[in-house]
């Protein structure tokens, strides 16, 4: 605890200083410039003679040089290279005249900002500006301490440049992490929207198939029952029974679908009952026959193995095709459902022999069938029979189908 508390306070203090600097940079620059200007003027008051090679220099020259080495610091962040050039010129005069002002070391501040915010190619030129003054002073006032003066200045500037490079690398790394987090957040939001759109499309397909098919069957049964009521009340009663059975079946499927939407995934109420499979095709065909459409089926025994989602796709395509036949084929139409197991795929063909009473394939059903087939790398094509009478829907589902993003269960 004793070691973490000071570091926490230090971090908090640095955070507040950075925030104040970002909010009012002019104030921070003014305070720093004023502080170093006062220090330079104090040295110009007489302390400079302790290290000067020529203590007899005019006080006015020393004052001007001190101001030239401190006042430009106010613009060090916006124009560090220009500030360093001005200060290097003053440092050159200071070294060549023998003043050897300590304020020359303030050149480290614009050097730091060059390393921090400017292209790396400017650093060699900055070091040229920094080393020319001490070299000029050494050439004019050669002495045993000249090498020490040059070496110490060089190492000080190298350390400052490395500090600026390190801080720049950390800042760039932090900025890249922030940018990556922002992009990940955007991608996550996009994935959520895409998942929601895909789920809406899936629900739309399910609702279309369930409601569209069962309502078509109910309509056919109701029409047949109305015509049979006058001549055969028993047939009318059978039609009413079939209407009730179909309605209950549709309500049961809708409840399963809506129950999945309303219950959380981890809820015990979210028991997901499998949707119809190939084994339910005969029951589907019986319902269509009761609605008044003669259907001939050719189904293999045993039924070919397919994943549950692919079986649902076959079931829904057959259901939608027969629903379209009920709606558009006209009176007297018949239908044939043929399911064949090929070595590498399952082939489904649904044909009817009726006279079209309106355009087919213009609504949501055809799009839904194609989307279902595409989920399992299947293909679907439909159109009129070559003879010009009737309609055909053909579906091909590979036996080794990929796993869909989400199995169609409810």
Image (tube, helix red, strand yellow):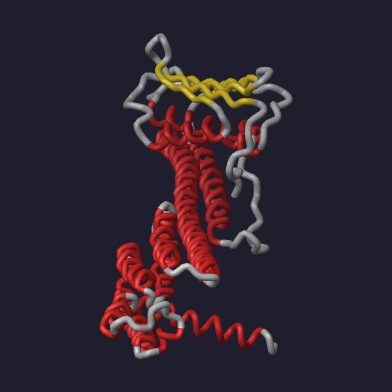
Give the percent coordinates (x, y) of residue 62: 31, 81
Viewer-nearest residue: 55 or 236? 55
| Residue at horizontal 54 percent and vertical 35 percent from the top | 375
Give the percent coordinates (x, y) of residue 14: 49, 81
| Residue at horizontal 39 percent and vertical 14 percent from the top | 389
| 97 left or right, relative to 247 | left
Query: Which residue is the extreme one toward the top?
Result: 387
The image quadrant that residue 277 belongs to is top right
Viewer-nearest residue: 360 or 334? 360
Please say if 323 is above or below 242.
Answer: above
Q: Quadrant of the N terminus?
A: bottom right
Residue 391 visible (yes or no) = yes
Viewer-nearest residue: 19 or 62? 62
Viewer-nearest residue: 125 or 344? 125
The image quadrant that residue 60 belongs to is bottom left
Query: Which residue is the extreme one toward the right?
Result: 302
């Amino acid at each position: 605890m004793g070691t973490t508390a000071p570091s926490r306070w230090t971090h908090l203090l640095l955070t507040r200083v950075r925030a104040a600097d970002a909010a009012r940079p002019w104030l921070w620059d003014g305070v720093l410039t004023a502080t170093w200007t006062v220090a330079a003027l104090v040295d110009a008051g007489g302390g400079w003679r302790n290290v000067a090679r020529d203590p007899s220099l005019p006080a006015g020259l020393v004052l001007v040089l001190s101001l030239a080495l401190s006042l430009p610091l106010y613009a060090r962040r916006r124009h560090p290279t220009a500030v360093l050039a001005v200060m290097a010129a003053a440092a050159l005069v200071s070294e060549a005249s023998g003043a050897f002002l300590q304020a020359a070391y303030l050149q480290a501040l614009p050097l730091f900002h060059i390393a921090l915010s400017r292209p790396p190619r400017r650093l060699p030129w900055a070091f040229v500006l920094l080393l020319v003054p001490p070299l000029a002073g050494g050439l004019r006032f050669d002495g045993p301490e000249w090498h020490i003066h040059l070496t110490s200045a060089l190492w000080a500037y190298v350390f400052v440049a490395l500090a600026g490079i390190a801080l720049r690398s950390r800042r760039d790394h932090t900025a890249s992490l922030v940018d990556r987090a922002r992009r990940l957040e955007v991608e996550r939001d996009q994935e959520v929207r895409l998942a929601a759109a895909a789920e809406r499309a899936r629900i739309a397909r399910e609702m279309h198939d369930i409601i569209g098919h069962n309502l078509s069957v109910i309509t056919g049964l109701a029409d047949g029952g109305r015509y049979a009521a006058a001549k055969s009340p028993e047939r009318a009663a059978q039609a009413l029974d079939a209407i009730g059975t179909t309605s209950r079946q549709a309500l049961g499927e809708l409840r399963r679908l809506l129950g999945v939407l309303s219950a959380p995934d981890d809820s015990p109420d979210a028991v997901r009952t499998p949707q119809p499979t190939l084994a339910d095709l005969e029951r589907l065909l019986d319902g269509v026959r009761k609605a008044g459409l003669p259907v001939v089926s050719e189904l293999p025994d045993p039924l070919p193995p397919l994943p549950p989602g692919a079986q649902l796709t076959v079931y829904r395509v057959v259901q939608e095709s027969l629903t379209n036949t009920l709606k558009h084929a006209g009176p007297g139409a018949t239908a044939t459902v043929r399911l064949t197991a090929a070595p590498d795929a399952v082939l489904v063909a649904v044909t009817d022999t009726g006279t079209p009473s309106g355009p087919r394939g213009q609504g949501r059903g055809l799009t839904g069938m194609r989307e279902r087939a595409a989920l399992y790398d299947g293909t679907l094509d439909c159109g009129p029979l070559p003879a010009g009478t009737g309609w055909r829907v053909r579906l091909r589902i590979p036996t080794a189908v990929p796993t869909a993003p989400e199995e169609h269960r409810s």
